[in-house]
Image (tube, helix red, strand yellow):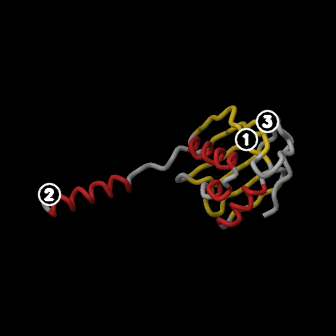
Amino acid sequence: MRPQLALALFFAVVLAGCGSTPPSPESVVRAWSQELNTGDNEDAAKLFAPGAEIVQAGTKLRLDTQAEAVAWNAALPCSGRIVSITTSGDTTRATFILGDRPKSKCDGPGQKATAIVRVRKGKIVLWHQTGTAPPPVGPAV
């Protein structure tokens, strides 16, 4: 293959990859749930944008750093099996059945919890637990 043709093919592949669209809000929420359920707080945290807002149990906090996102995910006592999920624009509403996590006992096993999650550019910018079930004790970050 001639060098010019090889170089042109290389740039075509690279540029095609640059134009890819971010994952859908629903797929981000499903990925976050999966990481949380397996106890992978690091990968769950990678799905949060710097400065993501958390609203839970009447408390608001911001996850300004990756370390704060890891700590917040690690402090969640429950896993959640998605039983309902709907998306409108960049916002997804997911309802979960709560259960134990690999390293913690859930404080409301079998209960339902709903979160409204806003995703931009493939990252969670808002995670807001709504009143489907009594909220678990929120982590302090």
- Position of residue 133 relative to residue 23, above or below, is above
- Tell me if label 1 and label 3 are in contact, CB under 8 Å: no
Rendered-image quadrant of the C terminus: bottom right
- Residue 112 numbered tag: 3
- Tell me if label 3 and label 2 are in contact, CB under 8 Å: no
Residue at image point 83% right, 45% down: 106
Kindly state the secondary structure of the residue where label 2 is placed. loop
Ranked by sequence position, the earlier of labels 1 and 3 is 1
Q: Is residue 121 left or right of residue 79?
A: left
In three-dimensional space, the C-alpha distance between marks 3 and 2, rounded to whole angstroms, equals 60 Å
- Residue 1 numbered tag: 2
In three-dimensional space, the C-alpha distance between marks 1 and 3, rounded to whole angstroms, equals 9 Å
Circle 1 packing at 10 Å, graded few (<14), some (14-19), many (20+), is many
Residue at image point 71% right, 37% down: 81
Residue at image point 68% right, 36% down: 82
Kindly state the secondary structure of the residue where label 1 is placed. strand
Residue 6 drawn at (x, y percent): 20, 59
* Front-most of residues 127 and 31: 31
Residue 78 drawn at (x, y percent): 78, 46
- Per the image, the residue denoted by label 1 is 80
Callout 3 amino acid: Lys
Which image quadrant for residue 108? top right
Ranked by sequence position, the earlier of labels 2 and 1 is 2
Q: Is residue 112 left or right of residue 39?
A: right
- Position of residue 41 relative to residue 133, above or below, is below
Callout 2 amino acid: Met
